[in-house]
């Protein structure tokens, strides 16, 4: 079974993180939420969640995909050396690496977007070092997935399920959620 690492830091975008975690679990995909600074993490709209683990305690062999939610906390994520190394190693190993909203900035900082087709929240577009920028809701370029923001979180999460568990599973989850 695929296992996805979802790092969380204060200021994460709740709609994106919770949608990603929920939809992946509905798709029978294991999710490890990892607090970057502590297990208690407060989102940008003051919703607090308890992460499963601390990022420093997660071992690379425990997951085969990393998905980053956006939000103002992305500014701190860009500077986290442990996360940067995990992202680079994960991506180089050919494993799914994904980000939504402002979080593609973290991938850009790690050198992952070079030569790639990507999207993001519009306000960070000019800060991305990528091959080509597009405004589609969800963009896949090989084992890289990016998306625009809170309004595209469900489509993004279903694309993650499709990538990790197949079209039939993604369709089943979408149908059960009444997503057309």
Image (cartoon, grey):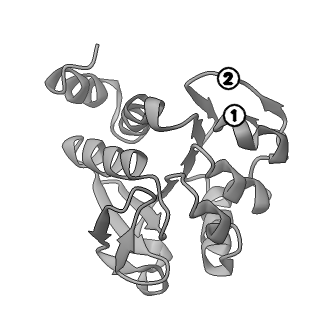
Query: Residue lying farthest front?
Result: 46
Query: Which quadrant is home to the C terminus?
Result: top left
Say above or below: 162 vs 178.
Answer: below
Q: Crowding at label 2, few (<14), some or many (≥20) Cα neighbours within 10 Å?
A: some
According to the image, label 1 marks what residue? 122
Q: Could you tell me if the residues under marks 2 and 1 are in contact, i.e. CB atoms within 8 Å?
A: yes
The front one of 102 and 72 is 72
Query: Would residue 33 appear left or right of 146 to someone viewing this image?
Result: left
Say above or below: 178 vs 43.
Answer: above
Query: Which quadrant is home to the N terminus?
Result: bottom left
* Residue in view at x 43 percent, y 61 percent: 6
Give x and y (percent) for residue 160: 42, 39
* Residue in view at x 82 percent, y 47 percent: 127
| Element type at mark 1 | helix
The front one of 1 and 8 is 8
* Residue in view at x 20 percent, y 25 percent: 172
Q: Nearer the viewer, mark 2 or mark 1?
A: 1
Give me the disc on residue 36. Answer: none
According to the image, label 2 marks what residue? 135
The image quadrant that residue 85 belongs to is bottom right
């Amino acid at each position: 079974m695929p296992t996805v690492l979802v790092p969380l830091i204060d200021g994460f975008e709740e709609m994106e993180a919770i949608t990603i975690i929920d939809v992946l679990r509905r798709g029978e995909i294991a999710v490890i939420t990892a607090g970057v600074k502590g297990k208690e993490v407060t989102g940008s709209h003051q919703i607090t969640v308890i992460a499963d683990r601390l990022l420093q305690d997660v071992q690379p062999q425990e997951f085969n995909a990393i998905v980053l939610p956006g939000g103002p906390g992305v500014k701190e994520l860009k500077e986290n050396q442990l996360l940067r190394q995990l992202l680079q190693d994960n991506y180089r190993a050919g494993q799914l690496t994904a980000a939504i909203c402002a979080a593609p900035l973290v991938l850009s900082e790690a050198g992952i977007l070079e030569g790639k087709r990507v999207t993001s929240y519009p306000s960070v577009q000019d800060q991305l070092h990528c091959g080509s920028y597009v405004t589609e809701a969800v963009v896949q370029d090989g084992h890289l997935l990016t998306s625009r923001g809170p309004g595209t979180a469900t489509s993004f999460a279903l694309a993650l399920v499709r990538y990790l568990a197949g079209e039939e599973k993604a369709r089943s989850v979408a149908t059960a959620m009444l997503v057309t």
